[in-house]
C-alpha cells in the first residue's frame, strides 16, 4: 500500500548526486517519510544522463538503453502512480545491430525467433549453443539479479554463504569464457560478450556473473523512452516535485560533515552548511572516500578499496547532427573494428590509445524523429578509450580520434558523412573528471572484476561513518541503469522508516 507522504517529517535526508541512483534513492527515502533534499552540481537532473542540444539537434549525453523497466515502474508505484502516465517506452527493432569489419551484420532481438534466425544465417551449428547459453544465463540471473541485486553485502559471512552457488555458476570465469563455452563463431562470441563493456568492464576479465545480461534483456526487453532518456529523467523530476522533494541544481558539495562518527550534513562549495539526519551519496565513492570525509573516520577496508580501486576505462563520445538521413541504420549499432581482445588489452591494461577502435553508435532518429530537424539525423558515437591514467593529452588526441571515427563510419555505415556532418562536439575523459568528479575520468567508476563485486565492491552503508549510505555505479550491485536503481533499493533494508513530526 503506497504511503501518504504529504505530512510533516521530523527527519531529513540529503541525497548528494542526482544520477539515476540518486533519483531512485530520493524517491525511496521520501516513501519512507523523510524530508528529502536532492543536490547536484549539474544544471539538470540525471547525473551522466544529461541532455545536450545544439542547432536543433538533441542528444542523450549518457545512458541510451533502458532494460528492466519494472525497476523504474516501482518508483512510481511507491506513490500509487503509473509510469505510463509520465513517459512512453518503445522497443526498437532490432534491439542492437552488430556490424563487423568485413561488412557483415548481425541483428539481435526483439524476439528469440528473430535472433535465432540471424544466428542460423551466420553459424547454423551455434543455434543449439545459443539456447544452452540462454538457459545458463537464466540460472545466473535467478541468483545474481533476482536474489542478490537488491540486498546489502556488508557481511563477509553473508558473502561466504554465497560462495557455493557462485562457484556452481562458474563466477570465477570471464564473460568471454562463458560465452565461448557455448558459441563457436567469433562474430557471435563478440556480440554476446560485449555487454560488460557498456558497464565499464573488459569481457575478458569481467566476472561471468554479468552473463545474466542476456537473460535480463530477453526477460524484460530493450527499451527507449520517447523523447530520450532525458524524458525519463523529466518524468522523475515531475514525480519528485509532486511528492515534495526539494531539488538544488548547479550546486557542488565539497565535504560530508561528520560529528561523533555520524554524518550530519554536507558543506557546499559556497561555504553553506546543510544539516540532515542521514546522507546518501550518489557520487563516485572513490572520490568521496579520498576527498570528502575525515580520513581518521574511514574504516581500513574503505581506505584500501579507495586507494587500490581498479577503475573502468574512459569514454570519448562524439555528438553530431547530419543534414541527411540514413534510414537503413539501426537505432543501436555496435561497430566492431578488426581487433577485439588485443584492443581491449590496450585500453584496459596498457592504457594505450590505439589507432583502431570499436564503437557504439546511437541513432535515436530511427525511433524518434524529434531528435533532429526534418530530413536530418542525430548521432551519438561512444568510443572506449583509456582513462586519464593513460596520460593522453585530449586537446591533441581528441580531434585526431574524431577524424578517424568519422572516416571509418563514412567508409562503412554512413556514406557521405563528411559532407553532411554538423553541430558536432565531444566529451573526453577530462570532461567526465571535471563535470562529474569521476576519478581519473573513468566512465563507470569501478570495473566489474570479481574482486570488485558483491562484498568486494563499495558497500551501500558508509564505512566508519554512521547514517551515511552509498548508491550508484561504484557500489553494489554495479553500473548500468538496472544496477544503480537496484543500489537504491538496497536502502529499503538499511534505512529505517522516518519518524513523523508531532
Image: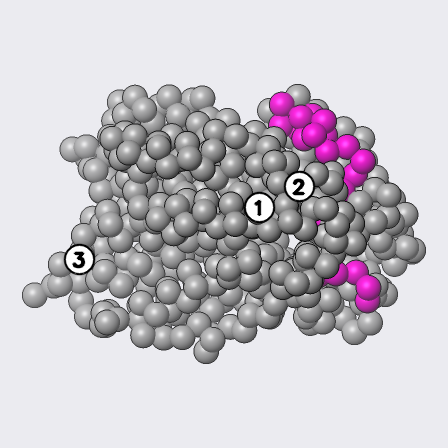
Front tag of 3 and 1: 1
Residue stretch rendered in magenta on the structure: 327-349
Label 1 element class:
helix
Residue 125 location in percent, x, y?
A: 72, 46
Q: Which residue is mark 2?
A: 183
Q: Residues within 10 Å of mark 1 (few under 14, many from 20)?
A: many
Tell which tag, 3 or 2, sits nearer the viewer.
2
Residue 201 seen from this side: no
Residue 179 image-quadrant placement:
top right
The Cα atoms of the two marked residues, 3 and 2, are separated by 51 Å
Name the residue rendered at 48%, 50% in the picture. Answer: 138
Question: Which residue sits at x=57%, y=67%?
Answer: 225
What's the residue at 26%, 71% (across, down)? 2
State the image coordinates of residue 231 (x, y, percent, origin top left).
54, 67
Secondary structure, mark 3, is loop
Task: Say whether marks 2 and 1 touch (CB < 8 Å).
Answer: yes
Give 466 or 208, whichever is nearer the viewer: 208
- Disc 3: CA contacts within 10 A as few (<14), some (14-19) or many (>=20): some
Q: Nearer the viewer, residue 65 or 304?
A: 65
Q: Label 3, on which residue?
A: 498
Identify the disc placed on residue 211.
none
Depth check: 68 or 25 in front?
Answer: 68
Distance between the alpha carbons at the discs numbered 3 and 1: 45 Å
Colour scheme shown: one colour
Residue at the spot of label 1: 133
Amino acid at each position: 500500500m503506497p504511503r501518504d507522504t504529504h505530512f510533516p517529517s521530523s527527519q531529513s535526508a540529503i541525497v548528494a548526486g542526482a544520477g539515476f541512483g540518486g533519483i531512485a534513492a530520493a524517491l525511496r527515502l521520501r516513501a519512507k517519510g523523510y524530508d528529502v533534499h536532492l543536490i547536484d552540481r549539474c544544471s539538470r537532473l540525471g547525473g551522466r544522463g544529461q541532455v545536450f542540444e545544439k542547432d536543433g539537434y538533441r542528444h542523450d549525453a549518457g545512458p541510451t538503453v533502458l532494460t528492466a523497466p519494472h525497476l523504474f515502474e516501482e518508483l512510481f508505484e511507491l506513490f500509487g502512480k503509473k509510469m505510463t502516465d509520465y513517459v512512453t517506452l518503445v522497443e526498437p527493432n532490432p534491439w542492437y545491430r552488430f556490424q563487423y569489419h568485413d561488412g557483415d551484420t548481425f541483428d539481435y532481438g526483439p524476439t528469440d525467433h528473430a535472433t535465432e534466425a540471424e544466428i542460423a544465417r551466420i553459424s547454423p551449428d551455434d543455434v543449439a549453443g545459443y539456447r544452452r547459453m540462454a538457459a545458463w544465463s537464466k540460472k545466473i540471473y535467478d541468483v545474481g539479479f533476482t536474489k542478490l541485486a537488491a540486498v546489502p553485502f556488508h557481511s563477509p559471512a553473508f558473502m561466504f554463504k554465497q560462495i557455493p552457488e557462485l562457484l556452481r555458476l562458474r563466477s570465477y570465469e570471464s564473460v568471454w569464457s562463458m560465452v565461448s563455452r557455448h558459441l563457436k563463431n567469433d562474430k557471435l562470441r563478440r556480440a554476446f560478450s560485449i555487454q560488460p563493456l557498456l558497464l565499464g568492464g573488459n569481457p575478458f576479465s569481467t566476472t561471468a556473473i554479468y552473463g545474466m545480461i542476456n537473460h535480463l534483456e530477453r526477460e524484460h526487453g530493450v527499451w527507449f523512452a520517447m523523447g530520450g532518456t532525458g524524458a525519463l529523467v523529466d518524468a522523475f523530476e515531475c514525480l519528485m516535485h509532486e511528492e515534495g522533494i526539494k531539488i538544488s541544481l548547479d550546486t557542488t558539495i565539497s565535504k560530508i560533515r561528520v560529528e561523533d562518527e555520524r554524518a550530519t550534513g554536507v558543506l557546499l562549495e559556497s561555504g553553506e552548511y546543510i544539516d540532515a539526519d542521514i546522507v546518501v551519496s550518489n557520487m563516485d565513492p572513490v572520490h568521496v572516500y579520498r576527498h570528502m570525509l575525515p580520513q581518521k573516520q574511514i574504516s581500513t577496508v574503505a581506505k584500501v578499496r579507495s586507494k587500490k580501486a581498479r577503475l573502468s576505462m574512459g569514454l570519448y563520445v562524439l555528438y553530431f547532427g547530419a543534414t541527411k538521413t540514413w534510414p537503413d541504420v539501426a537505432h543501436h549499432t555496435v561497430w566492431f573494428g578488426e581487433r577485439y581482445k588485443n584492443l581491449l588489452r590496450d585500453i584496459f591494461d596498457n592504457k594505450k590509445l590505439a589507432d583502431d577502435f570499436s564503437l557504439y553508435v546511437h541513432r535515436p532518429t530511427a525511433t524518434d524523429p524529434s531528435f533532429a530537424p526534418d530530413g536530418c539525423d542525430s548521432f551519438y558515437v561512444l568510443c572506449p578509450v583509456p582513462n586519464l591514467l593513460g596520460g593522453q593529452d585530449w586537446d591533441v588526441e581528441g580531434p585526431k580520434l574524431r577524424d578517424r571515427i568519422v572516416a571509418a563510419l563514412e567508409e562503412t555505415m554512413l556514406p557521405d558523412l563528411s559532407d553532411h556532418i554538423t553541430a558536432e562536439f565531444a566529451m573526453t575523459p577530462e570532461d567526465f573528471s571535471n563535470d562529474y568528479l569521476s576519478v581519473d575520468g573513468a566512465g563507470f567508476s569501478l570495473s566489474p572484476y570479481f574482486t570488485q563485486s558483491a562484498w568486494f565492491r563499495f558497500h551501500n552503508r558508509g564505512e566508519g561513518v554512521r547514517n551515511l549510505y552509498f548508491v550508484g555505479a561504484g557500489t553494489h550491485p554495479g553500473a548500468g541503469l538496472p544496477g544503480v536503481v537496484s543500489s537504491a533499493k538496497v536502502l529499503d533494508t538499511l534505512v529505517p522508516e522516518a519518524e513523523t513530526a508531532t
